[in-house]
Image (cartoon, rainbow, N blue to C red):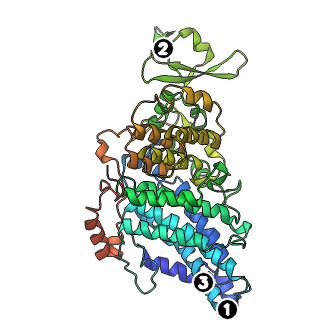
Amino acid sequence: MKKILILAFAALGLVACDDRMEKLNKPTKNPLEVPASTLYAQGVREAFDMMVNTNVNENVWRLFAQYWAQTTYPDESQYNLVGRTIPATVWQNGYRDALSDLVEGRRLVVAEMESGTSSIPEEVLKNQIALLDIMSAYVYSVLVDTFGDIPFEETFDTENVTPKYDDAAATYDNIVVMLDEAVASIDFDAEGFANTQDPVYEGSLENWAKFAATLKMRLGMRLADVDAAKSQKWVNEALAAGIFESNADNASITYFSVAPNTNPLYEDLVLSGRADFIVSNTLVDLLNDLQDPRMMTYAANPISFKFREENEVKQDSLIEDGVGRFVLYEDADGNDYLEYKETPFVMPASDAGKNPRLYVGGVYGSANSYKVYSHIGDVYYVPELKGTIINYAETQFLLAEAAERGGYNTTMSAEEYYNTGIKASFDQWDVEGVNDYLALDHIAYTTAPGDWKQKIGTQMWLALYNQGFEGWTTWRRLDMDLMNTPAGMDFEDIPVRFTYPLNEGQLNGQNYHSAGEKIGGDKVSTKLFWDAN
């Protein structure tokens, strides 16, 4: 970990004065210490950006979840983490950027509260500490779920630049303690940060309490295969506290239409001027097979069908791969209309005038031509698209899983939670036709193929599109029969964790090597403590 950098950024309050201001020495206009409210807003923004962006140097989770494929450079979808030092960047984004802001913000609030001279009421300051701790807990949870054992207790000890790596399971316990203590300390009759300082819930303490409970439930369900008793305890406590109740509760950050405050996706997909990503065959083939109308939101640019030809004359052509295909036609007035056809079916040559088009995903793990495969859906190119780290649909699928496992205080059947999760996903993306979709035999919970892990996991994976980290984690946890393997690779080659940053071996060598040995080897194939199956 770049501990020295973390300490330097924390000490400076992440502020850089230009030369002119330094010479003029006007700290009132260019303070050396950033207000806690600014550090809070900045730390939250950095945490969201870390999860939302799709820069291959920083965030490859949409690729690891196999939602997207690559065009010119397929290294990341071939699971090359070393070439761009991606683990180091994730580590840096979590510790040096997001956490250092949140921890420094907390230090400032505590100092102000202990000064005895603050004009801000103590209950407001306590609420601010709670919000800083809740967001810090989230960032730590991502780091644990990415690497396993990580520095926690000694991370921001200014006298120790070589912090030990704490046991991942113990860090989970500490994260839950952080969440519990934070919520318990909230005075809901007082304020926290002002609505203009809170880019997620606009100052709503009730929403942050729901977020904390929902995160606790997520962590609890992670433990289901390794510690059922603790899993049930955490989840039941979260349910009693109150989790997300609708998409209105989604943990989403609002971005804007003008740089530099656009959604990071817009920066990577549009402002970069590059065409590095397309939807993958893993995603598109599944949406086709399931007759899933989210196809038209998740993907764009259906590809003109290539008819079989004899002597340069188009012939009737057989399509037999998969279960079915969405076909987009053009009518006489130039308007598009959509049909779904079960395979095998014949595309008659007489339909050539209707310009039939099919959704075709790029081959995962290969270099694909941007022009000949379907693209990412148009909505993901919108600069003000919200960035989400936990959505309501996820909570419902977790509860469906809890209902199947038993021992949790669920109030509905697994089927009811499953249906609610699918409806929540359709609602989140303004997709129509959910009732018809749920009526399909291969979607209806009682008749869909596979065991409960396959049914729930597949729909949860689809609902987490654009939340690549959670899509990858859902596959890691539930082991659905879903993923493709790049040429020359086996399923065992799909990473289940990130390796530690290589520069940790130089900066914190003893603890770095000890951590790798403890978890069974610093390899992408080493399963995290909760990944028992």
- Residue 465 appears at what percent x and percent y? 53, 44
Q: Which mark, by number, is residue 110?
A: 3
Against 13, is 492 above or below? Answer: above
Residue 99 visible in the shown view = yes
In the current view of this chain or complex, which residue is farthest to the bottom?
116
Q: Which residue bears the numbered disc 2? A: 345
Whole-angstrom CA distance, mark 1 to mark 3, is: 11 Å
Element on which disc 2 rests: strand
Give the Cα separation between the discs numbered 3 and 2: 68 Å
Q: Residue at x 67, y 66 (%)?
A: 205
SS at badge 1: loop
Task: Inspect this view and state whether residue 30 appears.
Answer: no
Which of 329/243 is in front?
243
Q: Quadrant of the N terminus?
A: bottom left
- From the image, tell me which residue sits under label 1: 116
Q: Nearer the viewer, mark 2 or mark 1?
A: 1
Q: Does 339 appear above or below 313? A: below
Please tell me which residue lies in front, 430 or 449.
449
Q: Amino acid at mark 1?
A: Gly
Q: Tell which circle, 2 or 1, labels the residue nearer the N-terminal end.
A: 1
**Number of other residues with Cα within 10 Å of mark 2, as a class: few under 14, some 14 to 19, many 20 or more:** some
Which amino acid type is marked by label 2?
A: Phe
User: CB atoms at circles 2 and 1 under 8 Å apart?
Assistant: no
Amino acid at circle 3 = Val
